[in-house]
Image: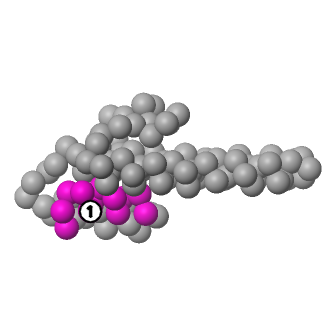
Amino acid sequence: MTNRTMAIVAYITLIGWVISYVSYRNSDDKSPFVRYHLGQALGVMIFSILLSVAIGILAGIVPALATVLYIVSLVPLVFMLLGIITASNNAERPIPLIGKFVEGKFSL
């Protein structure tokens, strides 16, 4: 897999992230580009899980907000799409809102 492909696949579900991570670990060229996008994708996935838990709790407490919370739950999907677009353009830009926070937090 090329570095660009590994970076793009990292954003596509947890299985895609694992595939990219294993390919990155087995490659001779440890590209900082792929490492950057692996970290960003992992940050988006962790954010998605935390957001899902928070939305589940809030929807249980205030059922009237369920529709609004459903729309908010689409935010991680938008972040993943932005990450895929950034990776396909061979750029290392952080994901909006959470990208700077997770930058350099994971040792991959």
Q: Quadrant of residue 102?
A: top left
Left or right, residue 5 beside residue 64: left
Q: Is residue 46 visible?
A: no
Callout 1: few (<14), some (14-19), or many (20+) C-alpha neighbours within 10 Å? some
Q: Amino acid at mark 1?
A: Thr
3 within the magenta span: yes
Number of callouts: 1
User: Residue 92 versus residue 23: which sits nearer the camera?
Assistant: 92
Q: Nearer the viewer, residue 85 or 18?
A: 85
Specify whether 2 is left or right of 67.
left
Residue 49 screen position, x and y as percent: 58, 52
State which region is magenta.
1-12
- Residue 1, can we see it? yes
Residue at the top extreme, as displayed = 100
Q: Is residue 88 magenta?
A: no
Looking at the image, residue 66 sits to the left or right of residue 20; the answer is right
Instruction: Check the image and name the residue furthest to the left.
Output: 28
Residue at 31% x, 67% y: name it: 19
Left of 49 or right of it: where is 19?
Answer: left
Q: Name the residue rendered at 36%, 47% in the picture.
A: 86
Frontmost residue, 1 versus 107: 1
Residue that sits furthest to the front in the current view? 89
Q: What residue is at 31 percent from the left and 54 percent from the top?
A: 88
Callout 1: helix, strand or loop? helix
Residue bearing the label numbered 1: 5
